[in-house]
Amino acid sequence: MSSTEKSQELLSELHVAYIKSLDTRRDDLEYWLTEHLRLSGVYWGLTALDLLNNVDALDREEVVKYVVSCQHENGGFGAHLRHDPHILYTLYAVQILVIEDAIDAVDIEKIVEYVSSLQDPTTGSFAGDEWGEIDTRFSYSALSCLSLLKRLDAVDVNKAIDFIMKCKNFDGGFGSTPGAESHAGQIFCCVGALAIVNSLHLVDADLLGWWLCERQLKNGGLNGRPEKLEDVCYSWWVLSALSILGRLHWINKDKLIEFVLAAQDPESGGIADRPGDVVDVFHTLFGIAGLSLLGYPGLKPVDPVYCLPKHVVQRIGLAERYHV
Amino acid sequence: SDLKRSHNSALSLSTVRHEFDKKFAMHGRKRVKPSTEAERQRKEKEAVKIKEYSDLVAACLNKKNSKTFDTEAFNYATKILSQNPDFYTIWNFRRNTLLYGLLKDAETDQKQEAFSNELVFLQALFQLNPKSYWIFNHRRWCLENMPYPDWQRELELVGKILELDSRNFHGWDYRRYVTSKLSMKIADADDENNNNSAESLTESEFNFTTTKINQNFSNYSAWHQRSKLLPSLFQEKNMTEDEKKALIDKEFDLVKSAIYTDPDDQSAWLYHLWLVGREIRHISVLGAYFDPKERGIVLSFDDEIGMISPFLVSHGSGNNNGKVQGDWRPSGGIFKHDQLNSDRLYGFVWIFTPTEDISNSSTLTVTIDPSSIVPSHSESHLMQTVKKPVINILNTDNIAASSENYASIHSNNVVAGSLIVPAPEILSTITQERTELLKREISVIKELLDLEPDSKWCLQTLVNLLNELKYASLLESNEANLLNNEIVSCCDRLIKIDSFRITRFEDLHLSHNKLKSMSFLANLINLREVNLESNLISRIDGIRELRFLKEVNLKNNLISTFETVHDGLLVDDKMVSSSRGDQEKLKIHLAGNPIIAANISSEFH
């Protein structure tokens, strides 16, 4: 098969092999320079594998053991052994354990304590860690994490919503902090967070849906904000937000599928940010998750709010919080 | 000093980092298939670097774990971060090394020098990593901890950053941070001239966005920033309505230049729509009465609403008396799977069943808090500026319904864009002014459309403005109908021009009207009149059993047949039912419906 023919379909087996090979690249300097992405990489890889019906390709016990080793005394998780705790990695840890159905392997109360300690009681915002960076990404991380643990009671949800709404912009989108420009990644975080706490009615679905569907460029790919390049990861951030808002049908699905498939590496597997570029596990997950949302055959359905396989979300007993 | 040496070595290492960065960024790297020999050589070179780097990290983390905050530790951190500025744990350690080690008992000028060197170090790193959160985080930390931070210099620095890349959101975020620090400093320093100084900062920032926009009309980030600064300007300068209007007119002029220069650029168009603003759609209570059989209150809206929190029901008139305990539920088993929130029920008609004895109350009152309602369309905004309707319902079997059976949740206010209260209103709330504004802008857009007939942004904006015009004016149904036709024809053109978004345009011509069916009225047994003008109703339905119904306004709908009201008598544009014996004849207004256009009247007598 020529490489152009190959890009018409999802090369599932190759992607599974690619993900399995990630931890074996210890003779690449890059492997060592990206230690701060280790736990994230496990989440991205594991979720992709589950969507590809191959969750067992990574050894469950090893995965759980690794995640547990990243937890600190204060309940938070770091990116890797000896990396400091941060809310982002705390969410990844919980997501991984939930997929592996092993949440009892860790101290849940401690996690709840850690996450809730990061909320500013005045503004409702969440910091990333003790150093105080504020960003709506962290609002999403907190609410998603606590929702998965069924402990949303531990934070002031109304204040959290207030802060998110302060980040709403003239175009219906959301930024990282009050005053910040709308960006698809932040929009996913804010819309996802609002969905989790039953407050999607605060979103201008028509206006934001319009802004989001205008992210689709002539080549079928999606960008993250006006005048930027298309990128497979935006195919997730934009798509999931559209899906939550019930407006997934506002983009051209076929062209987007074509774009994602063309970004695959037909020889070594994995998906890149755009056709012809170097692949990585981050774009591999978001490409596959995007395809799942678009109904690509052979993939497990993904939950657009939690970015986890739907069956996992259902297993925990969380209600569907988005437009069907 | 040790710190200086450490920084210098970092700077030379950063050129080495540059190569790594190009290779290892997660975006924009071309896939290359190197030969086996090239691969072998690469791995050989990297093996050395891997050993060096791992040893360095191990040494640094050992210092960290033993809480050894000395110069050696600091130097390790410098070397690591020069190669890998995303290693956030090392940034944390670096800060602790400064706080608890090197600057622990330092004099003020020592601290100032150390932090100044940090800023130089960060600047070098920034050149290679202009989009790293961690670098900006550390910079902020330095400025917040140094004895004499120079915020003015930071402002100049961020000006340069935005010159390199005017869309770098880290830059814009940092600029907002720096200007907020500057304005606090000005406020502190100069209490008397407080307003003036702080004002000028907002103004100068506003002018900065003007400069950016004039350099490049497609600078979305600048337009966005402007959307934040404009309301601040209004507030700070305590502008009169006329002054505001003058400033807004200047904004419209700026937008006009932008859209004429590049009609394909979305920034100016979205800013334009925000300037024009959107009228809040109101939801009306169609009817409310006490149903003796249900022994409960029946309430009907003209939108399928969700209830966030239950409406307050109280004894007597007004809502100062005791609350009536009971439960609300939507009637007709309306639980739609395609709602945004699957655990919230939606319905046109809501029934309240008291769980206590109400036989001693001759009147009950329902108070509807607008913020407790979720509309079915996000276009129908939640109305913060709305009056709370209080509905008095006679608790009696005698359905001599009062004229207070109808209440409307209205808003007269226009909120520009989707600014959430407490943002100040930008435009006046007078309807006529609004209509004039809309008509003026519609003609501007139409002029451009003549020049650029295939401009999709032009067409989309026109659709939005035409919809606003429909809502802004109290239009006779014919005018509304004409506007609807124009909207539909724009959507048809858009479907041809912008095929990716066909389904959105198809949704567009339906989404601005709410009702497609009137069958829910069947629940409102005491209904006397109802206004269903300008909806999408295609069948007259649900009113057969309503004994008290006198008048139905169905102007500007989609009714094309009379199949459900066979004994009707069509007189001009009204149909009058003759079958109700002693009761008053039912009048149904049908102007603006296809059936009138089709002139079917001759078939009836």
Image (cartoon, rainbow, N blue to C red):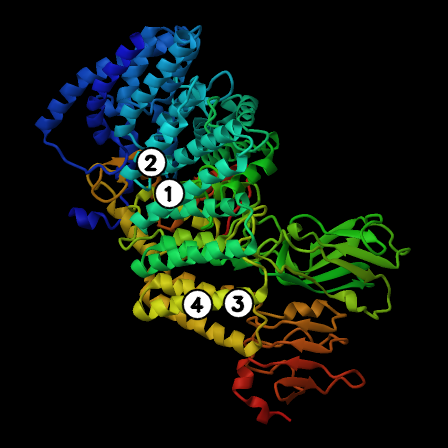
- Residue B250 vs residue B509, the one in the foreground: B250
Residue B99 in sight in this render: yes
Quadrant showing the C terminus of chain B: bottom right
Q: Position of residue A228 (x, y in %)?
A: 30, 46
* Sequence order check, earlier mark of 1 and 3: 1
B4 relative to A168, above or below:
above
Which one is closest to the eye, mark 2 or mark 4? 2
Three-letter amino acid code of the residue under disc 1: Phe
- Residue A98 vs residue B577, the one in the foreground: B577
- Which chain does the residue under circle 1 lie in? B
Q: Position of residue B379 (x, y in %)?
A: 54, 58
Q: Which residue is mark 2?
A: B159
Q: Position of residue A114 (x, y in %)?
A: 53, 23
Q: Which residue is mark 4?
A: B442
Mark 1 lies on a secondary structure that is helix
Report the Cα–Cα distance between label 2 and label 4. Answer: 37 Å
- Which chain does the residue under circle 4 lie in? B
Which one is closest to the eye, mark 1 or mark 3? 1
Quadrant showing the N terminus of chain B: top left
Q: Which residue is mark 3?
A: B435
Q: Are callouts 1 and 3 both on one chain?
A: yes
Three-letter amino acid code of the residue under disc 3: Thr
Task: From the viewer's perspective, tell me whether residue B529 is left or right of residue A117.
Answer: right
* Sequence order check, earlier mark of 2 and 3: 2
